[in-house]
Image (spheres, helix red, strand yellow):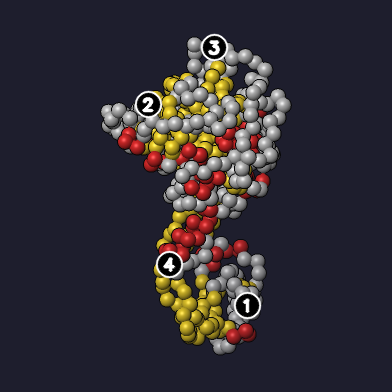
Amino acid sequence: MKRTLAFGGIVASAGMLAAGLAAPAQAADKPAEVNLANTNLAAQQVAMFWYGEAKANLIQATPYTVETTVPAKHVSSGGPSADTKPGVVPATGDEKKAASKSKNVNLPKTTGKVFFIGADNKPHWCTATSVQSQYKNLVATAGHCVYDTESNKATLDKWVFIPGYYQGKTPWGIYVGKTAYTHYDFDVYEDGDRNYAFVTVYNGVLPTADQKPSRKDGKYDSEYFKSKWAANKHLAALKADKSTAYSSLRVVKEEVEEKTRGGSWTDKQVEVSEVQRTNRGTDLTTVPAGNLRNGYKAGAPTEISAKDYGYGNFKKDSYVSEDGLTLFYKTKADHKFKYYKRSFTKRAYVQNTKKVIRYKVTGWKLTIGLKDVGALGANVGGQGLAYNQKVGSNVFVFGYPSGSHPDGNHAYSGKTLKWSYGKTFAAQAPALKGEELVGVKSSFTGEGSIGSSWLLKYQSARRVGYLNGVTIAVADRDGNKRIDTSLSPYFDGETYGVYQAAAKNWSGKIV
């Protein structure tokens, strides 16, 4: 049974909404709001994680494949319906301009990739887009590109948006997620009809000259753990820590010595740090080989060849042990230098030890210089938002599809932004708990295209339109083993309510 949800206290701001907009109905539940990086330090560490080690985590990230392909038998015609009157939020710079037509399809600067750490503790990405808002800090994507439906954790870790991303390049910087807003029904019930998210992001950052982790004091070694399970638990805690960035963390096994009960007394030899010459002009007087001060014992002095020690390089008339014990010598009356060395021992207690197998976590703590590049919308603009629109409208779909079709054809690499065009139709997908979805014909494969933006009335010349959907799954509806359909929740007044809850919040800078 579907739950009805609307949002109280929503007032349309003048100049932002098109004429005829009706506010959604009232209800008790509010959008789910979860902090991704709620302090500047935490956000800095997230940015460092992705920029560190020559952007290795970005480059090695793979498409997010959670809940992507839906069997054709689970996709059928359905009936989403508007819950209020149609409404729009104009795109950046489009508040007072009429639509224009263009034969060319220029790709929007607003679309990019979101990167995060998945339930498998590996880096992944989805598609997302910048959306117009009061503070120019809002990103829209699929709900399961924010909320971890695999492990049921609150959110995916180290979440960032990179518009225009291409093979490690971040032309407009990295925008660290601050707060994620999802529909209550998706957060609680994983309702496919509400599988969308709006995320506020901090100002973008780019690295300064140093893009590598500091190796001076950045080495991380944990304490030793008796079991691999305990070490892995510590590893997971470090990866989940949003206040510090770690890289190349791994569990290593080492054989170490540990103290056991008991021990024994023994004579321990003390190293000599210098060998020095004798005094000249008198007979040699030996130091007794018995007990010396502080419990030391000295062996008999042994004459050594001067040439082994550089002849006149020794200016002192003694030599000194490591701990400062000093002994003096005199030569025979032959007026020649003679050189001697002597060993020392001291009685010491030696603890019994045994060799055991232990585990520890090792890696690097990342540090990197960052500079502020401004708000997301100020750099790439923001798409408008349209809701309660008529099904059957033409939309452009922009995303980074990757992976192969069911027949093995590898149509997309996920490296570059692609587009498709089609007319929306009503759809249902019970496997996704989706009763009020919309579909569009598209050959985008699911890997990487999740979160792709569906833009209504897209103006190619100005690269803006109205966000009217986000891809949450794909399907092969005609059974020819080629993906031919993309699915999205129907954007209605409740979608606008989640947007409105997110759009009113400021993010600020992290550096």
Q: Could you tell me how far apart the alpha carbons at marks 2 and 4 are, in whole angstroms?
A: 48 Å
Check contact, mark 2 vs mark 4: CB within 8 A: no
> Which amino acid type is shown beneath numbered disc 2?
Ser
Q: Residue at x 51, y 18 (%)?
A: 106
* Label 3: how many Cα within 10 Å (few below 14, some 14–19, many 20+): few
> Which amino acid type is shown beneath numbered disc 4?
Ser
**Which secondary structure lies at badge 3?**
loop
Q: Position of residue 423 (x, y in %)?
A: 44, 21
Asked if 425 appears above or below 265 in the picture, the reply is above
**Which secondary structure lies at badge 4?**
loop
**Which secondary structure lies at badge 2?**
loop
Q: Position of residue 233 (x, y in %)?
A: 47, 61
Q: Could you tell me how far apart the alpha carbons at marks 3 and 1 are, in whole angstroms?
A: 93 Å
* Label 4: how many Cα within 10 Å (few below 14, some 14–19, many 20+): few
Q: Nearer the viewer, mark 2 or mark 4?
A: 2
> Which amino acid type is shown beneath numbered disc 1?
Leu
